Image (cartoon, rainbow, N blue to C red):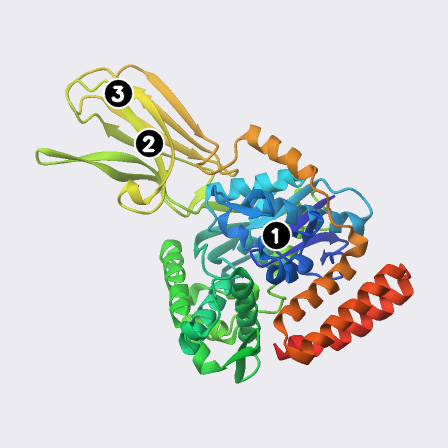
Amino acid sequence: MIIGIDLGTTNSLVAVWEGEQARIIPNALGELLTPSVVGLDDQGQLVVGNIARERLHTHPHLTASLFKRYMGSARETRLGTTVYRAEELSAMLLRSLKEDAERALGEPVHEAVISVPAYFSDAQRKATRIAGELAGLKVEKLVNEPTAAALAYGLQQRSEANFLVFDLGGGTFDVSILELFEGVMEIRASAGDNFLGGEDFDDLLVAHFISKIGNADLPDTTQPAIAQRLRREAQRVRHALGQAPVARFSLREQDREWDLELSQGDMAEVVKPLLERLRAPIERAMRDARIKVGDLDEILLVGGTTRMPLVRKLVASLFGRIPSMQLDPDQVVAQGAAIQAALQARHASLEEVVLTDVCPYTLGMEVSVKQGATVQSGHYLPIIERNTVVPVSRVQTVYTLHDGQKALQLKVYQGESRLVSNNIFLGELEIPVPPRKAGEVSLEVRFTYDNNGLLEAQVHVPINGESHRLLIENNPGVLAPEEISRRLAALQDLKVHPRDQQVNTLLLARLDRLYQESLGESREFIAAMANHFQQMLETQDEQLIRKARSEISQRLAHFDMEG
């Protein structure tokens, strides 16, 4: 059994192909979306999803979110006394999704297709594979999110079409142009921003609130608990302004309360810089694909942040038509990942479709340029241009620059800048060459890039027939195999909070958060409910616990609505 997973910045989902359709699998709380938040409870056990998200506000030192943004980097996050990389935090989340699938399917799950933003770099893709491995999954394939969305929409069933996928999630933005022709779905171009999503809209709302109220008048907004409370309120206001003309941004702390009324017009002005940032990747993708707006058959909206009316209005104005949003933008990628999983398993009910990918970034080498009597190093020579269909092999010829030169340093980079100092270093290899006059020795540098994100650099020296090879497998910041084994053992020792207690733990975490956010009589009322529920838990009578849980949940509903 192969499952499909949408590993998101804000929320994650797991799905499976059943019969004739993809089915989203609910988590232990019966919810389809699992917040991409992990943490440790007071006993040091792992908590994932809604429980962890509630504890972001009350136990920020034991909880982590938004870690997808740091995949492929060496950045670490401290939970209690232990530090974790983004791969490990993602593995905790994947492990929970895997267990959800096993519980629903009644059988072990060992394989998965995991979605990634089309604009993810090689290092980020490799980190995602490592996260799957740490979670006990064999990652059969990484599927680009726009490709998954296209599969979910059934676009592979057409004979031919050109379509653009506008994917704006909680933390990343992708725009991809796909072409379908005779059963082959090819990504013509991808562009994006790995640090642009709904979370950034929330950050701007928080900054606007602070600037309007005045930082000197507010409590210390850098405190983790207050910062998390502001982010949660900003998200609530953003969602509210998608439905209502005005909403109130509120913060309560100690015996004080701060309020700011925001209209849809205010919201548009606040987030205007981000709306402008959405334009550049669209224009780049259209240029790279060499396609006109009129040649696009369909515009698909993917990702929860596309629910914002401002975003939908922007897309409609850019393309002169109403974009498609028939499928739930939060679920469409997971559904497509499940379809890709079924294709990997050669499921009989699915018609085979060939998916091609592109290299999202330019790959090249450092060269020196002679200008008059001076030699300038640090220039970038592209060999495989971005948005080239993979697998691909390209060759460039370079020459020695100095008389008597005995070696050439091949330095491989990834990026779009003219100077290598602004690009990402991937690896290097020293090539010995016969000492000759400058320019007499040529070297044929061939880059080969495959579907698994492996880059091979081969250098042939015609004058002596020698060849040299460099395989870029581990980018800077990506864990080495021995380190993966060590961290896998450590994660396996981490105990998971009991699944059958999660619904009760979630309610207690919610009560704790609301207690901290409330004042006066409201705080006393919440404390009384928390004490009552704790007493019911101690009875171990499931009927009493279920009744108390239902009653308290109903009473708490208005607290969250009031913000």
Residue behind mark 1: 62
Q: Nearer the viewer, residue 522 or 168?
A: 522
Residue name at image x 59 percent, y 65 percent: 329
Instruction: Choose top left, top right, bottom left or bottom right for residue 138.
Output: top right
For label 1, the SS is: helix
Picture disc at residue 411: 2
Marks 3,1: beta carbons within 8 A: no
Say above or below: 194 vs 257: above
- Badge 1 local density, few (<14 within 10 Å), some, or many (20+)? many
Picture disc at residue 1: none
Q: Position of residue 470 (x, y in %)?
A: 41, 26
Say above or below: 7 vs 404: below
Identity of the amino acid at label 3?
Ala
Residue behind mark 3: 407
Say above or below: 364 vs 7: above
For label 3, the SS is: strand
Instruction: Choose top left, top right, bottom left or bottom right for residue 408.
Output: top left
Q: Nearer the viewer, residue 467 or 10?
A: 10
Residue name at image x 52 percent, y 37 percent: 452
CA gap between label 1 and label 2 equals: 41 Å
Say above or below: 544 vs 455: below
Identity of the amino acid at label 1?
Leu
